[in-house]
């Protein structure tokens, strides 16, 4: 019992690490599956980062669309990133987190465009902002652009 | 009111430029959400409460910008940009700005 108390900190750390790894991994897999599915579904909305549509002669109705998501790291990713920061190199645990979040924000923007009957989004801009808070590691990813609905 | 983040509105001609319009809002999150978020930090994933909060704030900033444009007599805002900055530990400012114009 006494040894258990002595190592309480370590045990809490190990449990958090395991829970973070397990749940975070399952959630990440599920999220990637859902992203791939919706990316297929929203395929007909084309997204451009250029300022003008490819066919200028076609008349369009324009409106601003936006998609955003706030994601947080899990405990395992945070610890892994801490280790990476000692040795340097690619922080893979955060790369996948940001990739997921950015794709999610694009999907939400596309969804907003589809609801407006648009077929393309031009001049897409990305923005990343850190969410302030005590001990909260979270970032907001925003994608926005001009949705164009072809008018006959 | 038409909003775009390009310099023109496809198929429409700008008749008059009315200058810069802007809208901003500063939002703080409540402690409950902070606690939930720090719990969520263990397992990771989306913080839905924050997503909603920031979305609402962005909409409000946009709305304020639109109201300013309407007051100036505009019917469209071009080249809209968003920016987010954290003021202090608990609050963030969301800012939207653009150029108010009259289109035909």
Image: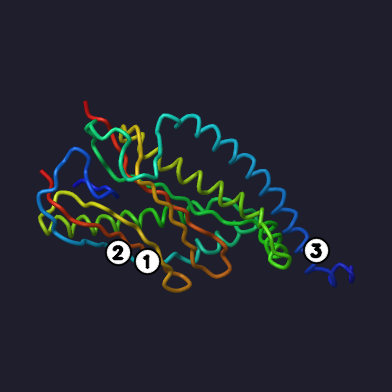
Say which chain tag 1 marks.
B
Where residue B85 sits, quadrant-wise, is bottom left
Q: Which of the image's four quarters has the C terminus of chain A?
A: top left
How far apart marks 1 and 3 lie (CA) works out to 40 Å
User: Going 32% across and 45% down the picture, which residue do you hit?
Assistant: A51
Identify the mark nearer the N-term, 2 or 1.
Answer: 2
Q: How are the residues colored?
A: rainbow
Name the mark nearer the viewer: 1 or 3.
1
Name the mark nearer the viewer: 2 or 3.
2
Relative placement, left or right, of A78 versus B88 is right
Circle 3 sits in a helix, a strand or a loop, which is it?
A: helix
Where residue A53 sits, quadrant-wise, is top left
Q: Are marks 1 and 3 on the same chain?
A: no
Say which chain tag 2 marks.
B
Circle 1 sits in a helix, a strand or a loop, which is it?
A: strand
Residue A136 percent across, percent down from the top left: 56, 64
Circle 2 sits in a helix, a strand or a loop, which is it?
A: strand
Q: Which is nearer the eye, A115 or A120?
A: A120
Query: In the rendered image, which residue does mark 1 sit on?
Result: B93
Query: In the rendered image, which residue does mark 2 sit on?
Result: B24
Where residue B63 sits, quadrant-wise, is bottom left
Relative placement, left or right, of A61 versus B85 is left
Tell me if residue A58 comes above or below residue B80 in the rendering: above
Q: Which mark is residue A11?
A: 3
How far apart marks 2 and 1 lie (CA) works out to 7 Å
Q: Which of the image's four quarters has the N terminus of chain A?
A: bottom right
């Amino acid at each position: 019992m006494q040894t258990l108390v002595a190592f309480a900190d370590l045990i809490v750390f190990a449990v958090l690490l395991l829970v973070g790894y397990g749940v975070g991994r399952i959630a990440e897999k599920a999220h990637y599956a859902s992203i791939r599915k919706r990316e297929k579904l929203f395929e007909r909305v084309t997204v451009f980062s250029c300022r003008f549509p490819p066919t200028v002669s076609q008349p369009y109705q324009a409106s601003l669309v936006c998609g955003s998501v706030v994601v947080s790291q899990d405990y395992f990713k945070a610890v892994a990133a801490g280790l990476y920061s000692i040795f340097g190199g690619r922080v893979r645990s955060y790369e996948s987190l940001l990739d997921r979040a950015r794709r999610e924000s694009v999907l939400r923007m596309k969804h907003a465009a589809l609801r407006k009957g648009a077929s393309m989004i031009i001049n897409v801009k990305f923005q990343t902002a850190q969410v302030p808070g005590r001990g909260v590691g979270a970032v907001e990813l925003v994608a926005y652009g001009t949705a164009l609905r072809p008018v006959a | 009111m038409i909003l775009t983040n390009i310099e023109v509105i496809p198929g429409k001609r700008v008749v008059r430029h009315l200058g810069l319009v802007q809208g901003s809002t500063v939002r703080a999150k409540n402690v409950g959400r902070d606690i939930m978020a720090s719990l969520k930090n263990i397992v990771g994933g989306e913080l839905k409460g924050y997503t909603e909060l920031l979305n609402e704030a962005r909409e409000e900033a946009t709305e304020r910008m639109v109201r300013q444009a309407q007051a100036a007599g505009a019917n469209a805002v071009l080249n809209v940009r968003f920016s987010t900055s954290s003021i202090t530990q608990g609050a963030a400012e969301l800012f939207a700005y653009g150029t108010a114009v009259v289109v035909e």
